[in-house]
Image (cartoon, grey):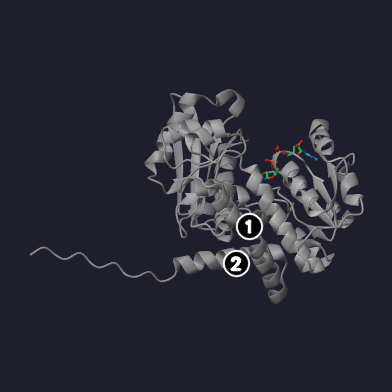
Amino acid sequence: MTDVRPTTEAEGVLHTLFRSDLGGHEQVVLCQDRETGLRAVVAIHSTALGPALGGTRFHQYASDEEAVLDALNLSRGMSYKNALAGLDHGGGKAVIIGDPETVKTEQLLLAYGRFLASLGGRYVTACDVGTYVRDMDVIARECRWTTGRSPENGGAGDSSVLTAFGVFQGMRAAAKARWGEPTLRGRRVGVAGVGKVGHHLVEHLVEDGAEVVVTDVRADAVERVTARHPRVTAVADTDALIRTPLDVYAPCALGGALDDATVAALTATVVCGAANNQLAHPGVEKDLADRGILYAPDYVVNAGGVIQVADELRGFDFDRAKAKATRIYDTTLAIFERAEADGIPPAAAADRLAEQRMAEARGPRTPEVPHQSRP
Ligand SMILES: NC(=O)c1ccc[n+]([C@@H]2O[C@H](COP(=O)([O-])OP(=O)(O)OC[C@H]3O[C@@H](n4cnc5c(N)ncnc54)[C@H](O)[C@@H]3O)[C@@H](O)[C@H]2O)c1
């Protein structure tokens, strides 16, 4: 998916929103509360499948325009992710502008909650970079359309558990497509980043009988994994990991993990990991395919977290959410099949399938019965 970005200075965010093929958002709301210093952007890309769902990012942007563009791009991404996760939710995302370390206060979050409540449920929020479960608990005091809350407040808590489970399902699908069996048994899997999601993923892999190699910039994160699983080995950095003979590479740290140099050096023939926005630039998906590397699209396999928070709206039930995350296996396989049939990379096939689901939902609606005119 290409990001929205004005190509000339004259093409500001409004041009992007109203004129470009990459905009098309239904609603963008700017919020300001001078008393608390709140400045926020809520972008609702689509409600074709249901209320827009996506997290709130709290971040110090280089400019206000950057903040709006980020909200536009992220919300559009959520439409695709939610569509393929099989959720009855459209895509939305919000950004609060400012350094969370210095700007975030309880009063600011409450003011933000009141703005979200005014949208009447068209946008449902959750955690993202810079916002945490405890922040969602505060926002929820003003807005009932808040997920990612703590279990004490009716929430699902840490979403990394089902995110890792979903990535594992995607990886099983990739193994089935590549080697004919939906298992990682006997495969060597390299996990880059063993934080919240990565260390849960290692658990699944070890249990399945894979040989696991990990790396992380934090020595304590690596030690936590190797202490628990003595057969898991560690290498110095991501550069060393991608050069290690691997069957599967699982980027579970930051975005942009798949750049030209990495794709050229990869020994793995499958890439499947939790990190968001793994493709560093448009065209990488084709380079991967040209090298015979099967790429499981990031937003498809890492949807376990959004599946988890969406379930909160029905009164959280872990088993129900887990059953839904299990379907990531079928979705990933369907994407590989579509890619094969259409002769396109899996990332493009995922976009097509998501667009198809959204278009079908937008299809012809039953016309409303006109109001009877009063006698
Ligand atoms: N937590 C979720 O539910 C969730 C859901 C969807 C997507 N994701 C994505 O998955 C990725 C991991 O999320 P997380 O919640 O586990 O984050 P996290 O911060 O807990 O873990 C990331 C780990 O990567 C390590 N790391 C950072 N830079 C690295 C580098 N250059 N090389 C190796 N390791 C490095 C960090 O030290 C950390 O241990 C992120 O891209 C996130 O956006 C997470």
Q: Secondary structure at mark 2?
A: helix
Disc 2 target residue: 353
**Would residue 42 be found to the left or right of residue 8 on screen?**
left
Image height of 285 relative to 241, above or below: below
Q: Residue at x 46, y 60 (%)?
A: 48
Image quadrant occupied by the N terminus? bottom right
Image quarter where ligand 1 lies: top right
The image position of residue 211, as x and y in percent, is: 86, 51
- First in residue order: circle 2 vs circle 1: 1
Q: Residue at x 62, y 60 (%)?
A: 327
Disc 1 target residue: 326
**Would residue 141 be found to the left or right of residue 295 on screen?**
left
Quadrant of the rendered structure where residue 281 is? Answer: bottom right
Disc 1, ligand 1: is the CB inside 8 Å?
A: no
Instruction: Bin the neighbour count of mark 1 within 10 Å (Cα to Cα): few under 14, some 14-19, many 20 and up.
Output: some
> 171 or 241, which lies in front?
171
Q: Secondary structure at mark 1?
A: helix
The image position of residue 290, as x and y in percent, is: 82, 67
- Asked if residue 10 can be seen in this view, the reply is no
> 231 or 19, which lies in front?
231
Amino acid type assigned to the residue bearing label 1 in the image:
Thr
The image position of residue 354, as x and y in percent, is: 58, 63
Image quadrant occupied by the C terminus? bottom left
Amino acid type assigned to the residue bearing label 2 in the image:
Leu
Q: Residue at x 71, y 70 (%)?
A: 344
The image position of residue 75, as x and y in percent, is: 55, 50
